[in-house]
Image (cartoon, rainbow, N blue to C red):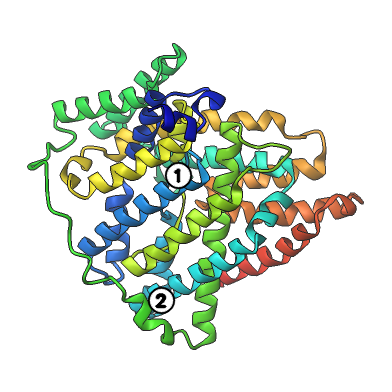
Amino acid sequence: MNKIAAYFNFSELKTSMRTEVLAGLTTFVSMAYILFVNPSVLGASGMDKGAVFTATALASALGCLLMGLVAKYPIAIAPGLGVNAFFTYSVVIGMGIKWQTALAGVFVAAIIFMLITIFKLREMIIDAIPRDMKLAISAGIGFFIAFIGLHGGGLIVANKSTVVGLGSLTVGTTWLTIFGLIVTLILMSRKVPGGIFIGMVLTSILGLATGLIKMPSTIVSAAPSLKPTFGVALGHIGDINSLQLIIVVLTFLLVTFFDTAGTLVGLAEQAGFMKNNKMPRVGKALMADSTSMLVGSVLGTSPTSAYVESSAGIAVGGRSGMSAVVTGALFIFGLFFSPLLNVVTDQVTAPALIIVGVLMAESLKQISWERFEIAVPAFLTVIGMPLTYSISDGIALGFIAYVITMVATKHAKEVHPLMYVLFFIFIIFLWILNV
């Protein structure tokens, strides 16, 4: 135990094995939904859902273990939500490209990812982002995940007249969310250790007791076979032979790059890891992400990325890589206890996401709002993420505005050269995604 504590620097980080295990468990419970959502989304492209389930669990476990053991951060990795929808609905269904070819595109994008990570280009880009924008990214992610929680819990719904509106209070599951939110608010206000996790457990128990959450019929089940998807990407690399497919590969690259970079920066700000506007060991964190994306494509899943739900684990005290190791181990166990994961519904995780969103909004106070040229891009970053339902789109809007306002106010010399490069990349990025 002492060796583990020394390896993960428990003393320096002022944490403990108990806290890290609780943080890892909280993060896992907050993001366990991906085990079921990812097969559902990718299944619409024609992929075998059982194989995708197993690939999702294994790719997530590998990413978390690498992030924890090598980079030593309490940040989980799993197949990204926005990019899996792009894979299915834009590439396969929209463009008529076979899922096998799309999976090969993910593999090629992962190879490029690893190369630019090895040459530290990704690290250079993250270091080039000004502190105010990093703070805006952190707050924006908080708004984004809070919106996910409010929508997933039924408190905010689509409305034809007003775009969004308050959900119906006649729905039982919405009241389950309200119960969880109230309980978690009380626990957090009273500074009860592990308040977020305790709130999730109590919400699950109430859901089972009232029948709002279906009692699982079995506890243990065998992991589905990987055979339908394993290695398919390797056999279809030669299919990437047109401009359209090259654009698909570049889009996978851009979306995953900025989703991961933005999430890493936001979580690092939340946990207090940033030093002199830089994230220590960011190269190792990015390599963990790149490796899991590469392996995931071979196993049979869409690109992986750092998960914003890691903020739930950080909020309960997770500060070392041990919490990510715990999350990774739980993904492996999740392969065999998948029926129990059905208990963790959107209504159970919603209160946790909302509360964490509140905690991450704290970084707003450190932004230089008195400077208009900073306030505009920061605002667009923060508001853009929830309104576009995309971390990368929010970052794109903010970064484009940043260069424009800084040049307009004659502060062009304060802008890092890479920010000018990103300015043009983001314009192309938004154009590709919206034509």
**Direction from residue 336 to residue 352 in the image, left or right:** right
Q: Amino acid at mark 2?
A: Ala
- Residue 270: x percent and y percent? 57, 33
The numbered disc on residue 69 is: 1
User: Is residue 433 positioned above or below 343 on the image?
Assistant: below
For image coordinates 46% across by 84% down, the residue present is 240
Tell me the quarter of the image containing the N terminus: top left
Observer able to see residue 433: no
User: Is residue 290 positioned above or below 30 on the image?
Assistant: below
Quick one: 35 or 7, which is closer to the camera? 7
Q: Amino acid at mark 1?
A: Leu
- Residue 168: x percent and y percent? 32, 35
Label 2 Cα crowd, 10 Å radius (few <14 / some 14-19 / many 20+): many
* Furthest residue in direction right, as rendered: 410
- Residue 177: x percent and y percent? 32, 30
The numbered disc on residue 313 is: none
Tell me the quarter of the image containing the C terminus: bottom right
* Quarter-of-image position of residue 83: bottom left
For image coordinates 50% across by 70% down, the residue present is 111
* Furthest residue in direction front, as rendered: 3
Q: How many marks?
A: 2
Q: CA distance from mark 2 to mark 1?
A: 28 Å
For image coordinates 81% across by 45% down, the residue present is 373
Quick one: 380 or 330, which is closer to the camera? 330
User: Which residue does the numbered mark 2 point to in the structure image?
Assistant: 104
Which of discs 2 and 1 lies nearer the camera? The answer is 1
Observer able to see residue 226: yes
Quick one: 156 or 52, which is closer to the camera? 52
- Residue 305: x percent and y percent? 47, 54
